[in-house]
Image (tube, rainbow, N blue to C red):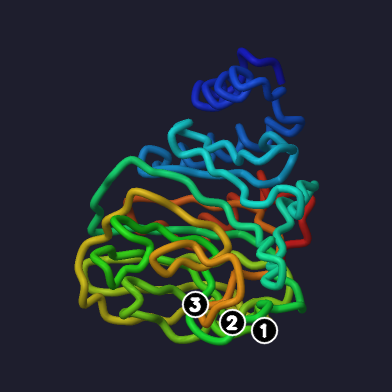
Amino acid sequence: MKFYQLDNDTKKYIKRLNYNGIKTPVDIISVDQFIRGLKDLGIYGNMIEAWFFRKNHNAGSGNIVYAFRDSFNNGTINNISTAVWNDRGLICTANATNSLSNYINGNLRTNILPTTSMFSVFMSTTAGMENFTSGYPYVFSLSTNQYNSGSGGSSLSNTSIGSNGTSFGTSFGNNNNTSNIQGNTLFKIVKGSLTPSSVLAESRDSSLTLTSSSATNTIGLLRYDRFLFCGRWNNTIESSNGSFGVGFHGTQIFHCFFDIDVNFVSFESLFKSTIGKGIALP
């Protein structure tokens, strides 16, 4: 496909990458198909941001994960020397002993939302969560003010529950927490969503059945101005030994979030047929 045949928003993504000295991703066609698919579903305008972690969809090297819609939302990889870009995504390691954990964080334009859907696609490993003792290591979190929601923020997070890397859920404000969802043993698509009345987590279990767990929203609106992938924050981002753990071993593949409630199955189908091709998704 020629450049002029690409969707205009894909072209803008390429131009921002090129401006920063990054070559056009090898598999930009899959990215383009994904964006066109979101538009066909009528939800592209509701996607606030997206981050592609497979090396053929992004920079593929270096310590910056370029955001699709807005350069202001680019993420910085902590301790890039211990992270690895590959065809599946960005391999992150939780190394508490030497404080070399990988996490990706960055800024977002300040916003307040009553309804949100956040999707995380990743692969956790059997190594589980190193030095984890309590709390919720985050796969993807939106927050504001201070990293700890109890200090005035209202973070919404797709989290790992427990230390084995197989149980996941969604947390809002560290007070409204869904119950555990037993995810697939390898690749996972987890959706966390917020409405004025509820917090919901959805994913497929080991038998590929779509499962969900919900909690009552007793906090209200989501406020955010930053994001975090991997790691854990508690006023500051923890990257060494601590009671809240340091993140998880695994591969980050894709994350995005919307200002509406997006259907899990519709998103899953589009992902698998476009930017998820070549990954053994269940």
Q: What element carries label 3?
A: loop
Q: Is residue 186 above or below residue 181?
A: above
Q: Which of marks 3 and 2 is in front?
A: 3
**Quarter of the image containing the C terminus?**
bottom right
Dot 3 surroundings within 10 Å: few (below 14), some, or many (20 or more)?
many
Closer to the camera, 15 or 226? Answer: 226
The amino acid type of the residue labelled 3 equals: Tyr
Please tell me in which quadrant of the rendered image residue 63 appears: top right
| The N terminus - image quarter | top right
Q: Is residue 84 above or below residue 134?
A: above
Camera-side residue of 214 and 274 = 214
Q: In this view, does 34 lie to the left or right of 26?
A: left
Is label 1 in contact with label 2 (beta carbons under 8 Å)?
A: yes
Q: How far apart are marks 3 and 2 (CA)?
A: 11 Å
* Of pointers 3 and 2, the one earlier in the residue sequence: 3
On residue 136, the disc is 3
The amino acid type of the residue labelled 2 equals Ser
| Label 1 close to label 3 by CB (< 8 Å) | no
Q: In the image, what residue type sits under mark 1?
A: Asn
What numbered label is drawn on residue 172? none
Residue at 57% from the left image edge and 52% from the top image edge: 104
The residue that appears at 43% across and 73% down in the rendered structure is: 170
**Front-most of residues 34 and 153:** 153
Task: Give the structural element (helix, strand or loop) at label 1.
Answer: loop
**Real-space Cα separation, disc 1 to disc 3, in angstroms:** 12 Å
Give the structural element (helix, strand or loop) at label 2: strand
Q: Is residue 120 above or below residue 219?
A: above
Residue count near mark 1 (Cα–Cα under 10 Å), binned few <14, some 14–19, many ≥20 = some
Q: Which residue is disc 1 drawn over?
A: 164
- Residue 167 image label: 2
